[in-house]
Image (cartoon, coloured by chain):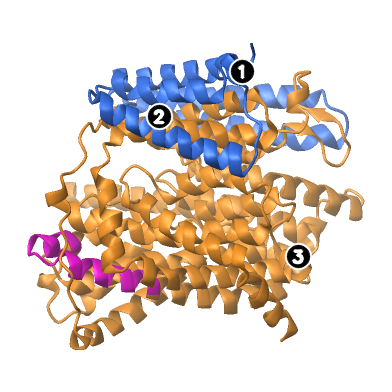
Amino acid sequence: MTEQRQDILLGVVFAVIGVAAAIKAAAYSGASGGYPMVLGVILAGLGGLVSLKALKRKRLDERPLTQHTPRMLLTLVCAALYLALVPALGFYTTSALLVIALPVVLGFRQPIYLGLVTVVFIGIVWSVFSLLLEKPLPTEIWKRF
Amino acid sequence: METITSILSSVLATGPILAMIGSSILGVFIGALPGLNPVMAIALLLPLTYSMDPLVALAMVAGIYNGSMYGGAIPAILLRIPGTPAAIATTFDGYPMAQKGQAARALKIACWSSALGGTASALALITVGPLLARATLAFGPAEYFWIAVFGMASVGVLVGNDAVKGLMAAVFGLLLGTVGLDQLSGAPRYTFDQTWLLSGLDLIVILVGLYALPPVLSLAERADLDGLSASDLKLDNVRVPWSEVKTLIPTWIRSSLIGISVGILPGAGGNVAAFLSYNAAKNASDDPKSFGKGNPRGVAAAECGNNADNAASMIPALALGIPGNVIAALVLGALLIHGLQPGPQLFHQNPQLVGGFMVEMLLTSLIILIVGGAAATRVFAQVQRLPGVLLVPTVLVLMAVGVYVINGRVIDLWIMFVAGACGYFLEKMEVPLAPIVLGLILGPMAEQNIRRALLISRGDFSDLVTRPISATIAIATLALIIWPIGSALFRRRKTSNDAQNEEVR
């Protein structure tokens, strides 16, 4: 997508957020609503300005949003899956799975090296957060039975 | 005198000392790893500091900050890959020195220059910070309001290439800061009947997302499958003679002054300080052509300049509540999570803590001299052997655990994820992230003070601009916003005049 199109879209998105925020704030009573309403209006104005500037300047160069779209999307999907599985499988189990799976997905093919890094890394995280700081983390699935 | 003794005794206790040494070492490692940066490291560290003593937490921030700024020089010199953006100028002469077989010498000069720049900067913070804070004793709600607005406007306008996008980001941050219960009336705002939104968006959750996820995604995109070989990282131990050290002293003094000045100005960062220092050293040299070909003074200028920016950027942050750069904003975040409101009152209400942090910035600069020695640098350089692809999941896990332990809520993990994904695309579209963070930090301060000022003046808006100090800050803010628009119009008119003149000829 060209810089111009990106900036027009960006400005429109922020303008819509600003307008929506201002409308929502108008329903709040007294001074509670005044401040966010003003902010919403200013945000909408600045968003509009970004779009107008983009329309006027006509920057037609391509501005890539990613360096390598498949890898970026795979990482985002793996990260989202990880967050979804943490409450179900437990923190350390899911984290170990992520540390093993994500490098493989990205093309890393050294299983012993990967296994060693996973054990050492999860060991360090467990020592710091569970042993030293005693922070409660989502329970491991195998501990629930 | 009593306060100074008390500050020193609390900073020199076991906890802060261990935190300073440990975090300085960790900071050098982080700086040495391309793809990781001090902002990301401090963002990841902040959630861990909730249960810590504030002085220990701030000692860790100071150590990571100073350590990573030096650490960035290691790959810059050995591989021409700047470990941090501030180390770009170090590559200009550091890498040519390494190619000539002088890598150890370049690293030693970088280490000394970093330590000296950091020390000069910490001394500036210790002397100027309290003076500036004392000058702000006369401030009332109207002045505090304008200070918050000035801080956001300066970062919004000066950070990034497009002032309008910067201001838009700042206003967006302010708007995000209004989510949750109104602190004055208790009314819920933008909570959409969700109880988890009543306490607002957690600053640290947003910070970790915005500053840790985008570099992780970039690392994944690069997919570096092989680390470097041991032979690439071979270093010999060398001595730098006193005769050479003497030639570097003027460069260190000049670069320290430049770095400190840049640090105090909101918006500019260590990379700007390094470039300005490098150019100044080149211009002052009898042999400017040797710069870029392995001149040690180039390394000294860049490293001294970028470290001299560190503590100086804390001067407006601690004294006025206006962070000079993103790391200063993170330090403000660290203060906020310990219930301390940054700004002029901080010096009066918590002198021990502020003084302690300033001393920690000084001591961690000196620690670099020890942890950045030749033997240690050889160890730090070994992190380059780690394939970058392994850092991607490990940083993701650290982000998740750090965010989860704040409130013990899974929803925070998703907020972090969304903030990070948005941050990634916003950066690509040249929208700076620092103003969003600043809006979140300074938003409540701006809102509370404008509402207090209006309560005092019984709704009279003119009171906001008729007091001499508030009027001055308001004019400065207006000038700051108008300046880029005016200069752009001037440039455009000049370009069209030049074009017309060309046509006439």
Q: What span is colored magenta in the figure?
A: B94-115
The residues tagged by marks 2 and 1 sit, at their Cα atoms, a distance apart of 24 Å
Q: Is residue A123 left or right of residue B227?
A: right
* Image position, residue B28 (x, y; %): 37, 57
Q: Which of the two discs, 3 and 2, sits closer to the camera? A: 2
* Image position, residue B318 (x, y; %): 63, 63
Q: Which residue is mark 1?
A: A143
Magenta segment includes B78: no
Q: Any idea which chain is the blue one in this picture?
A: A
- The picture quadrant where one finds residue B117 is bottom left
Report the front residue among B221 and A104: A104
Name the outermost residue toward the left: B100
The residues tagged by marks 1 and 3 sit, at their Cα atoms, a distance apart of 49 Å
Q: Is residue B233 visible?
A: yes
**Numbered label tally:** 3
- Write down the chain letter for disc 3: B
